[in-house]
Image (spheres, helix red, strand yellow):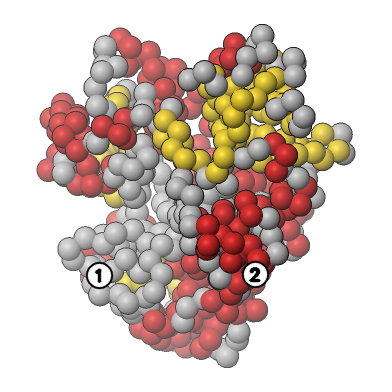
Amino acid sequence: MQWNLKEIPPQQSVDQLRDALGIPEVVATLLVQRGITSFDAAKEFYRPSLDALHDPLSMCDMDKAVARIEAAIANEELIMVYGDYDVDGTCSVALMASYLLSYYDRVSTYIPDRYAEGYGVSLQGIDFASDNGVGLIIALDCGVKAIEQVAYAKEREIDFIICDHHLPGDQLPDAVAVLDPKRSDCDYPYKELCGCGVGFKLIQALAAQRNLGIDSLLPYLDLVATAIAADIVPMTGENRVLAAHGLQVVNQRPRAGIKALLAQRDKTSFDISDLVFVVAPRINAAGRMKHGDYAVALLMADSVDSCLGFAQEIEAFNTSRRSTDEQITAEALAKILDQKEEDRATTVVYEPHWHKGVIGIVASRLIENYYRPTLVITKSGEQLAGSARSVSGFDVYQALDACKEHMIQFGGHKYAAGFTLDEAQYPAFKAAFEKVVAQTLDESLKTPQLSVDLELKLEDITPKFYRLIKQFAPFGPGNRTPVFVSRNLKDSGWAKQVGSDQSHLKFKATDGQYSFDGIGFGLGKKLDLLQDKQSFDLVYSLDENHWNGNVSLQLRAKDLKSSDL
C-alpha cells in the first residue's frame, strides 16, 4: 500500500485561522487543507445550516413537477411512487410516499423485483400501474434513461415525473418533468445529490407551494441521511447539510423503522458509520434476499411495535446475505486461481448459479484480494446480470460505456455499476473490458493508495483535540475522517491477533512517554512487525472505544510498516 502524505498548507494561512478560532495549530492545519481559511467558512463548516439549502425551483423542471402533482391531487388521481430496490431507492419511496400521504390518501408504492424485473423502471411495473388506474408515476433513484418505458406508459395515459441523480444519456425520457441536477441544461448549483436528495428537493418545493417552511420537513431527514450515507455520494454542500441535520433526527426522534434497526447497538449517540454499517446493509438485504417492499414497509411504519416483525425479518435476510456472499466470494477466489488470471488488468468472473442479490458485495470483496476493476456476473432469466466495482481513481462506468456494444443495458456511477448482456456476448464482452481497462488504467492506480493528512505526535492526541476533530463530521467522500501518521512507535508488549479468524490486530502503541490502545481490522498478518520491540510507523484515524460503560480514545490502524523502511 502506498502512503501519500498531503501537502502542508502555507503557514500564514494556518496561523491566521488558528488565531481567529483559538484552536490548536494541528486542527487549523486540517481545516486549511479542507479549503477552510476564514472564521466565517469555519462557522459554516462546523455548523451546517438549513439556510444554505438551494431554492428547489432552481432545478430544471421542478415547477412542472409541482404543478403536475397538484393537478393529480385536485383531480383525485392515484399516484404511484416507484423506486429502486436499494437503500437510496427504498428511502426515496418511503420519503415521497409518506410525505404525500400526510395530506393526500390516494398514494401507492412500487418497488420492482430485483430478479423478475431488474433495475430501473420496468414494463411490468407500468402494466401494474395501468391495471390499477394510476394516472401519475413518480420515479425516484431511476428513470433518467427509461425512454422506452416512459413512452410505453404514455400510450397507457400514465404520466411520469422522474427524480434521478444518475448521468443522463443523449436523450431524455418524454416525461412531464425530469428532475436530475446532472442534466446538461440544468443550472442547479449542487450536482451531487443522491436520488433521495432529489426527492427531498421535490417535497421541499411542494411544501413551499403549501406555504410550509423547511422545519416541516425535518422528520424526513433521517431517510435522506441514510440514503446519503449508503450511496457514498460526496459529503459536501447540500449533502453535508442534509446529513448533519438528518443525524440529529436519528439521535433525537428517529422514525420507528430506523429506531428498530439501531435498537441492538450499545450506543447513546449514532453517526454516519452506524447508518453505513448497521442500517444500510439491513435495508439492502431486504431487496437482495427477498423484496424491497419489506424495507419500505419498515421505513413507513408508524410505531416500533408495528415494525418489529419487519425488522426481525430483515435481520434474518441480512444474516442470510452474509452467509451467501461469503460462500460466493470463496468460490470466486478459487475460480480466479483456477483460471490463472492473477496477472490480468481486471477481474471478471461468472457463474450462473450465483445469487444476484450479493454479486456487488462479492465484487467489492474481490478487490480486497486483487486490487483492480472487477465484474461479477450471474444468470438472471435468459440474460446475464453483472455488478461492477472499481479501484480508487478509475471510472468503471466509462469503461463499461466503451464496451456498450456487447451489453443490453448498463447504468451506475464512477465506482459502482450494473449491467445486463446476452450470454453469447460474454466472451467478447470480457475481452473488450480487459482491453479497455488495460489501455486506460494508470500505473499509479494499480496499487492501493492511502491518503494521510498529517504527521502527528502522540502527545498531540488529547480529549480536546478529539472533540474538535469529531466536529468535522459528518464524514464521507470529500470530507474524510482525518488520517494521521506517527513514526518510530513500539508496542508495549501485548500485541496479539484477535477475531474468530485471528485476522485483526490489537496493540498498545507508545513513543516512550505517551501510549494509546490500537485496533487494526484486517491487519492481523502484520503482528510480526510489532514483536521484539521493533520500531514501526503507523497510519491511523482516531475513534472511541466503548467497553463496559467506559469510553477511551483509541487508534484505528489503517496500515503499519517497519520504521526501517
Q: Which residue is mark 1?
A: 184
- Kindly give the residue lying farthest to the bottom in the view shown: 211
- Kindly give the residue lying farthest to the front in the view shown: 12
Q: Secondary structure at mark 1?
A: loop
Residue at image x 65%, y 46%? 274
Q: Secondary structure at mark 2?
A: helix
x, y (%) of residue 9?
A: 48, 55
Residue at image x 60%, y 86%? 212
Residue at image x 29%, y 59%? 167
Q: Which residue is mark 2?
A: 20
Q: Can residue 562 be seen here? A: yes
Asked if residue 544 is positioned above or below residue 426 in the image, the reply reads: below
Q: Amino acid at mark 2?
A: Ala
Real-space CA distance between mark 1 and mark 2, rounded to the nearest whole angstrom: 40 Å
- Where's the N terminus, which quadrant? top left
Determine crowd level at label 2: few under 14, some 14-19, many 20+ residues with C-alpha closer than 10 A.
Answer: some
Toward the viewer: 84 or 391? Answer: 391
Toward the viewer: 229 or 285? Answer: 229
Q: Quadrant of residue 543?
A: top right
x, y (%) of residue 42?
A: 59, 67
- Kindly give the residue lying farthest to the right in the view shown: 549
Asked if residue 47 is positioned above or below residue 532 in the image, the reply reads: below
Q: Quadrant of residue 332?
A: top left
Q: Can residue 270 be seen here? A: no
Q: Nearer the viewer, mark 1 or mark 2?
A: 2
Asked if residue 412 is positioned above or below residue 532 in the image, the reply reads: below
Q: Quadrant of residue 515?
A: top right
Toward the viewer: 424 or 481? Answer: 481
Residue at image x 38%, y 66%? 191
x, y (%) of residue 251?
A: 73, 58
